[in-house]
Image (spheres, rainbow, N blue to C red):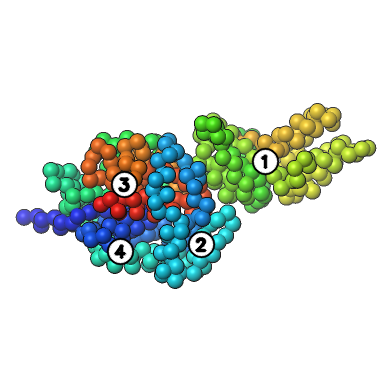
Amino acid sequence: MPSPPRVYDVVILGAGAAGLMCAAVAAQRGRRVVLLDHNAQPGRKILISGGGRCNFTNIHCTPDRFLSANPHFAKSALALYTPQHFLELVNRYRIPWHEKTLGQLFCDHSSRAILDMLLAECERGRTDIVLNARNIQVDRSSDGYHVSSLAGDFAAHALVIATGGLSIPKLGATGLAYDLARQFGLRIIEPRPALVPLVLGGDEARWTELTGVSTEVVAWSGPAQGRRPAPRFREKMLLTHRGLSGPAILQASSYWRPDEPVHVDLAPALAPGTKLIQPLLRPRARRDETSFRQALRAALPQRLANHLADIAAPAGWSNAALDTAECNLRDWQFHPVGTEGFEKAEVTAGGINTDDLNTRTMEARSVPGIFVIGEAVDVTGHLGGFNFQWAWASAVAAGNAL
C-alpha cells in the first residue's frame, strides 16, 4: 500500500528567491508550508547572482523598469513590498551591503548571506523544505492539490508555482511552470531569453575581431511602447567572440525581436552640440581618412575607432557627407542573427499570462488555490536588482493571501 500524502496548508514548488520568500511569509502567518525543489540545494541562482555578491534589489524600483504584456500588472505588488521593506530585512540580519551605480544594492561579501537569511526566515515559520523532489506531478481534487514526487507525496488546499523560467538550465531551470500552466488552463506568453548577449553574423561578424573592447554607449531596441519611446540604456557595451554583450546590450536585448535592429549611440559622453567629427568641421581642417580616424580615436577606444574608420568613412568629404557619417555613428544599427539563448540569459521574458492572475494576490483567476510568482510570470525586470525585487514582491503578495 502506498503511504498517504503528507498534508499541509500550502505546497510551494521551487526553492529559489520567490519560493523561499513566499514560504517564509506564509509560514510566519501560521500556515503549514512545505517547499519542494528538484535540486539538491536551495537558492542556486541566488548564490551566483551579482558575481557572487547578490544584487538583491534596486532603490529605483518603479513599474517602468519592468517589461510585460500588461505593463500595469506589477504595480500593486511592487507598491505593497518595496526595496526599503527588503532592505529592512537585510539590516535586521546585519548583512553588510553597499550601493553601486544606478541604485543597485549588493552584499559586501557573499550571496550566501541572502540565502541564509531566507532559510532562517523559513525556519522561523517552521517551513518544511524537501530537496531532490524530482518528477513532480500535480493533480487537483475537490479538497485541493495532490503533489507526487520521488521525495514523497504531499497534499494541500493551495499550490504555489515558483519554479522560475528557462534561463540557466545548468542550474536546474525547467519548463515545469509552463507545463502546469497548460495543465490548468492558464495562458502563456511565449518565453524567450532576456538580459542575454546578442550574436552577430554575415558582414557584421567582423565585429567579433574586436573581442574584449568595451565602451560606454546608449543602446535601445524595439518599437515605442504606447506613447513612450523604447527605453534607452546608457552603460557599457562589450564586443565578444560571438557578438555583443555588456550591460547596455543585455538591457536592450529584453526588448529586441528577430529581424529588428539594435541601435547604439557610440559616443554618448560628448557634450551637447559636440560632434565626433568636430575636428573636421573647423576652418581649414583637413578632410580625409587620416583626419577622420584621428577624430574617432579622440573619443573612442583605439581598436573600435580604427574599425569604424574602415567601415564608416564618409562617402565624400562634403558637409552633408560628414553629417550623414555623424548620424550613423550616433545611431549605429546592428542586426543580430539571434541571442546566446537561455544558457546565457540572466532571466526569461514572457511566461504565464498576467491576465489570468490576480494582481494583488497572484492567484489564478479561473483556478482557485493556484498562485504563480517570480520569474514564471510574464513580468521581467531590467538589469540591476529589479528581478529580485519582483521575486520578493510577488512572493509577499501571495504569502499574505494564502
Q: Mark 4 sits on what residue?
A: 122
Q: Quadrant of the N terminus?
A: bottom left
Q: Residue at x 43, y 35 (%)?
A: 69
Q: Amino acid at mark 1?
A: Asp
Give the SS element for disc 4: helix
Q: Mark 1 sits on what residue?
A: 265
Residue 117 at x, y percent in the picture:
38, 66
Q: Nearer the viewer, mark 1 or mark 2?
A: 2
User: How far apart in space, not on screen, are marks 1 and 4 (Cα)?
Assistant: 47 Å
Q: Residue at x 59, y 44 (%)?
A: 233
For marks 3 and 4, the one nearer the N-term is: 4
Q: Residues within 10 Å of mark 1 (few under 14, many from 20)?
A: many
Q: Residue furthest bottom?
A: 94
Residue 230 at x, y percent in the picture:
56, 36
Residue 388 at x, y percent in the picture:
43, 54
For marks 2 and 4, the one nearer the N-term is: 2
For marks 1 and 4, the one nearer the N-term is: 4
Q: Residue at x 82, y 45 (%)?
A: 294
For marks 3 and 1, the one nearer the N-term is: 1
Q: Mark 3 sits on what residue?
A: 361
Q: Residue furthest right?
A: 284
Check residue 2 in the rendering and tell me which mark sits there, or answer none: none
Q: Residue at x 41, y 57 (%)?
A: 45
Q: Residues within 10 Å of mark 3 (few under 14, many from 20)?
A: many
Q: Mark 2 sits on what residue?
A: 106
Q: Amino acid at mark 4?
A: Cys
Q: Nearer the viewer, mark 3 or mark 4?
A: 3
